[in-house]
Amino acid sequence: METSGLNTILQFAFWVTVALTVAGAAIAVFPRNILYNVLGLALALTGIAGFYLFLGSLFVALMQLLIYVGAICIAIVFAIMLSRPLHISAPPRPPVKMWLSILASAVFFVGVVSVALKTKWQCAAGHVYKASQWSVENIGNALLTRYELVFEVISLVLLVAIIGAVITAGYSRRISS
Amino acid sequence: MSEGLLGSELFRLILGLVIVIAFSQLNALFLVWLERKVSGHIQLRPGPMEVGPHGLLQTIADGVKLIGKELILPLKADKKLFFLAPVLVFTPVLVGFLVLPFSPGLIIHDMNVGVLLVFAFSTITVLAILTGGWASNNKYALLGAVRSVAQNVAYEIPLLLAVLSVVLMVHSLSFSHIVESQKTVWFIFLQPLAGLIYLIAATAETNRAPFDIPEAESELVAGFHTEYSGMGFGLFFLAEYTNMFLVCAVATSLFFGGWNGLFGFSFGIPGVFWFLLKTYLLIFVIMWVRWTFPRVRFDQLMNFSWKVLIPLSIVNLLITAVVVKII
């Protein structure tokens, strides 16, 4: 009786998280107001942090919050502040651009869904993961052993981005001076 | 197990949340009074004196007045975001209290990633300030919000790097572990540079003078909360003072030994009093700084973080890593 009550609460919380994530994603795409888009993105990313929580890793959930909501969204806001003034209303969407992006996201969606459907999911009930298995040490070890290559490639991407930013900033400053 | 989760753990969390909300109100009432007293005495004035003994009840009177005020919505403001911002600004501060180690038995929820929790949620404050400043549709508010974002991006990095050097020494992200390992020697003696960087960056993170350029009143009226009245403004104010307590409490547990006494002697004083004493002393120092130093210029602020604090904290982290590896 008690367990089913707890399960109901958990189920409810899970679907609320799903709803928030989907709503956030919709807000991130549909409104013409760019600040709404960013806040919607932040909401969707927070929802994803909630999914990590349901998967049992508080650490990954908090990292998601710290990096994606804290850093990425703020960086996007930064870029917005440097671009067109916010009080000028945005011009209507060019249809070609819109259809192209719909096509691109449809291709991505079909790809992800087909991979998800093809995978033979195994129920974790047989070997329940404990919180200790998702400890910081284990994640750190996995990152620096089994997933070392992925880790390094990601840092390479960041390095390229930093060099790009430095060159862009230095170049534009040289032109203006 | 399930009964324990529903019965005691959930109950504990709810009770803890109620206590935290009550505490944050009381704390803000006290801190506003303290700030006015400190500023008064630094400027050779008595500060509030009329309401209650030495003006102790002045903030209650102000608070009641604030609740009674009308919430004014500017005509061209974005209504939804305008009212979302004050709510949003208060949430991360409340979450932070969940993991604060007041004393060995007085932690609402001792998580093994507690330090991370506080800093992960503190980033939401910036989003809230930005939302409020933008939704007001006022150029001063927007300027304040933009400055706040720039400042927080710059000062979050040295803050986290300073915290990381302590985490490296303890090998744990849990507040209670960090405090326990300072039983005899506080980390401020082992990590003086990290402690100093943390305090400076934390002052900037809470938008306190001399880093209060998001609300610099001589340039921006009141910055991001220019258009807020009544409790909308009240919530921003409450969040600022609660945030100050949170930041100082984290500093106490990371660098000043938390619930431990001086050099292993507690003099029979319970841990929670040590903790509160140190936290309020740090808050006093931050207030003292506010009324002593002039506000920095925007370029000085940016240069100080990117060219001084961040390189210093990276060097400090590297040295810590090497020393920890050798020992």
Image: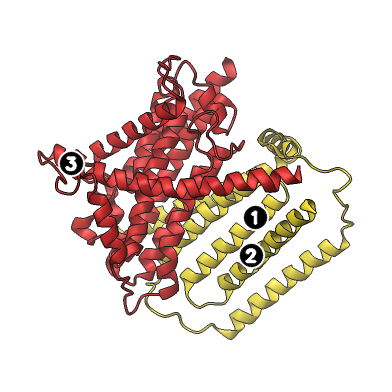
Looking at the image, residue A68 sits to the left or right of residue B213; the answer is: right
Disc 1 residue crowd, few under 14, some 14–19, many 20+, Cα 10 Å: many
Expressed as whole percent of the image width and height from the top left, the position of residue B87 reads: 44, 61
Q: Which residue matches tag 3?
A: B54
Q: Position of residue B103 (x, y in %)?
A: 50, 29
Confirm whether residue B229 shows in the render. no
Q: For the residue marked with disc 2, what is the amino acid?
A: Thr
Residue B262: horizontal and vertical position, in percent? 40, 17
Please give left or right for residue A120 compared with residue B36 in the image: right
Eye-nearest disc, 2 or 3 = 3
Which residue sits at x=59%, y=79%?
A97
Q: Nearer the viewer, residue B260 or B43?
A: B260
Q: Secondary structure at mark 3?
A: helix
> Which of the chains is red?
B
Q: Who is closer to the viewer here, B319 or A42? A: A42
* Mark carried by residue B10: none
User: Which lettered chain is shown in yellow?
Assistant: A
- Residue A50 is marked as 1
Q: Residue at x 68, y 46 (%)?
A: B7
Residue at mark 2: chain: A
Q: Does mark 3 fall on the same chain as mark 2?
A: no
Which one is in front in this view, the residue at disc 1 or the one at disc 3? Answer: 3
Q: CA distance from mark 2 to mark 3?
A: 51 Å
Q: Secondary structure at mark 2?
A: helix
Crowd band around label 3 with a 10 angstrom C-alpha radius: few (<14), some (14–19), many (20+): some
Alpha-carbon span between mark 1 and mark 3: 48 Å
A82 with respect to B60 (left or right):
right
Give the residue pinned by disc 2. A21
